[in-house]
Amino acid sequence: MIFKTLNLNNDNLYSIADNKTKKATNTYIEEWKDKGLLKGYFGTLAKNIYSRTRVKNSEILELLIYGAYIEEQSKLDEYEKQIMYDDINYYYSEGQKQIKKKKEISILEMALFLYLLDQPLYNGYTFKQNIEVMIRYNAEQVYKQCLINIMQGKENDINDSIFQNILKRQQNTKLCINNGKVSGSMDLTLIGLNNKAIVEGIKLFDKNAKVQFISDRCDNVTPMCMNMDKMIFNVNDYNIFTRYVGTSIKDIRKEKVKVFGLVQGVNAPPINNFFHWCHSTVQYINEE
């Protein structure tokens, strides 16, 4: 629909959009505003184009592709968050059960759930920022392919195999389930959040608890995870330990580390110095 609406070619791609196209684009932006979608980088980009009278067709193409991704994500937001809440709440309960005290198991309060979502993930982004970065990257991939097709005089058709392969790769990056094996950024995000939820559940009954790092010992396990397997950490005090660091086998080395509590990527899973899907966990230590 976007491609047919703009009808771009190599001659008008970088030309100033005509009044009809600009007016139609402003209507899209107003609709996004009414839906509350003008946030972050996308919101800044849309508002900038809306306020200008002279906008290139290429800029409008980029915005409309970006907007398509934003709208699609908005349809998934509540569904994804409900799945995440149920998953995180399960591990929050499991953390409480590990202590094995005769206390009533509490469910995850929404305030704590939102707090966990707002904490840095394995890559330093919050959950919201992670989604924004992924959408921006995915939209740029489609936009670049559109430019290549236009410059080569080819028709842009979302059903074309090139676009379908791009979309398939993007979907697999977000979440891919194949013969029981799960991968993707959502899986990695939940590994981190679920381990945080276990710790929060443990702290609910034992604020001075200790937990043990349990490596998944999979075929692709990193030296970092193997090295930390069975290490014990304080959840509410400083931890001083020695672990492997490095981003490749060539620069791997041991370093002494000091952190307060559990820090994702340092002494809390996922540990992703080498790229692989880390499925390590933490478990409560009953010192009695």
Image (cartoon, rainbow, N blue to C red):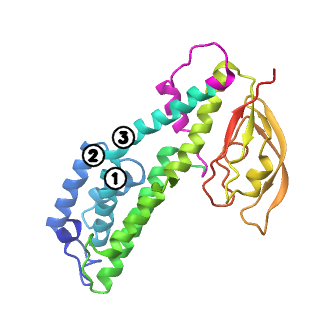
Foreground tag (1 vs 3): 3
Q: Which mark identifies residue 70?
A: 1
Instruction: Please state the horizontal and vertical placement of residue 44, each as a whole percent of the image.
Output: 38, 53
What amino acid does circle 2 point to?
Answer: Lys
Marks 2 and 1: which is nearer the front? Answer: 1
Disc on res. 33: 2
Q: What residue type is labelled 1?
A: Ile
Q: In this view, does 103 lie to the left or right of 164?
A: right
Q: Is residue 165 above or below residue 67?
A: below
Horizontal placement of 123 versus 78: left or right?
A: right
Residue 10: x, y in percent? Answer: 27, 84
Q: Quadrant of residue 251?
A: bottom right
Residue in view at x 68 percent, y 60 percent: 274
Q: Give the range drawn in magenta.
A: 97-123
Instruction: Compare residues 24 and 145 and report the one nearer the observer.
Output: 145
For the residues labelled 1 and 3, the Cα–Cα distance comes to 15 Å
| Image quarter of the N terminus | bottom left
Residue 79 numbered mark, or none = 3
Give the answer, above or below, for where 58 lies relative to 233.
Answer: below
Binning the other alpha carbons within 10 Å of mark 3 as few (below 14), some (14 to 19) or many (20 upward) gives few
Residue that sits furthest to the bottom in the current view: 152
Q: Please state if 284 lies on the left or on the right of 31 as rendered.
A: right
Badge 2, how many Cα within 10 Å: few under 14, some, many 20+? some
Between residue 23 and residue 280, name the one nearer to us.
280
| Circle 3 or circle 2, nearest the eye | 3
Residue drawn at point x = 54 percent, y = 46 percent: 189
Badge 3 or badge 2: first in the primary sequence: 2
